[in-house]
Amino acid sequence: MVCRASQTIGGNGFGRIVVVTDSVGSPHTAAVPFDWLHRLPPSKKITVVIDDSHGLGVLGANGKGIHELINPPASLELLITASLNKAMSVPAGLIMGSQAILNSMRQFSMFSGASPANPAYLWALTQALPDYQSAHQKLLLRVEQFVEALGEAIHLFHWIEKYPAFTTDRPGLHEYLRHQGILTACFPYPGPNDPAITRLVITPLHTLEDLRHIAQACRQFAQNS
């Protein structure tokens, strides 16, 4: 798929091209490779837009996001967008890019008319920043402990190493866990007629006892289904 995209971009006659992608797979958790960035033709004007909403706060050193993990060629214009309301729990968003492209965006009426983030939330973010690094390290530890506790029941889920979201379309798991006092997200995605995706998310606030309880319930479900 990625190779096809690179070939398509190289073979078309458009002078300016925009490529849009996520930093983490959806609807199921999956790693997104970015080595294809180096196979894009340097002769074309290409802008790559990455939505890092599900990566910021988790991926990269200290959760700094996908930009910590990729090294795009200088010929590309890279733009990263992200919601802060996922791993960082702040109802706000951000855009990262070159000074030139950010200055251009500020000229659009849609940008100037958009509501800014609530100052109280931004103040809270600045106060919490010193704690994010330790929370990120604890999150990685909790994910590792959960995977170990799951054992063979890990096959129930789509997952990637060091990432706290575990997804599955296995029918009945959401209801089974709910009866065990464990709440997961579960809804059809991306459309109302698509299979329901169950999403189980680990946080730094989970205790080892919590994780063992969740893992035991998952193992029991796997054995009985």
Image (spheres, grey):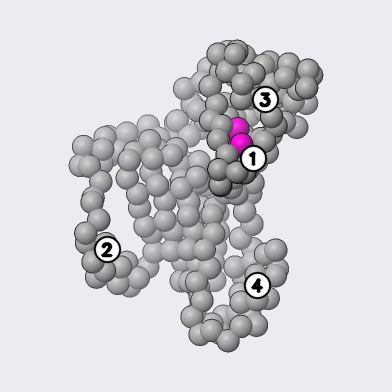
Do the CB atoms of the residues marked 4 and 3 lie less than 8 Å apart?
no
The CA distance from mark 2 to mark 3 is 43 Å
Q: In this image, 161 relative to 43: left or right?
A: right
Give the mark, 2 or 1, whose residue is nearer the N terminus: 2
The CA distance from mark 4 to mark 3 is 40 Å
Give the mark, 1 or 3, whose residue is nearer the N terminus: 3
* Quadrant in which the N terminus appears: bottom right
| Pair 2/4: label in front | 2
Q: Please report the bounds of the magenta region as a residue range.
A: 195-199
User: Of helix, strand and loop, which one carries label 4?
Assistant: helix
Do the CB atoms of the residues marked 2 and 4 lie less than 8 Å apart?
no
User: As displayed, is residue 44 above or below residue 214?
Assistant: below
| Pair 2/1: label in front | 1
Q: Tell me, for residue 6, which label it has, or none.
A: 4
Residue on which disc 3 sits: 172
Residue 201 visible: no
Packing grade of label 1 (10 A; few <14, some 14-19, many >=20) is: some
Report the amino acid beneath label 3: Gly
User: As displayed, is residue 27 above or below residue 107?
Assistant: above
Residue 7 picture location, percent across and down: 68, 76
The CA distance from mark 2 to mark 1 is 35 Å
| Pair 4/3: label in front | 3
Residue 104 picture location, percent across and down: 30, 72
User: As displayed, is residue 176 above or below residue 77?
Assistant: above
Residue 48 picture location, percent across and down: 50, 67
Residue on which disc 1 sits: 195
Identify the residue at horizontal 48%, vertical 34% (top origin): 136
Report the amino acid beneath label 2: Met
Q: Tell me, for residue 110, which label it has, or none.
A: 2
SS assignment for the magenta stretch, majority? strand
| Pair 4/1: label in front | 1
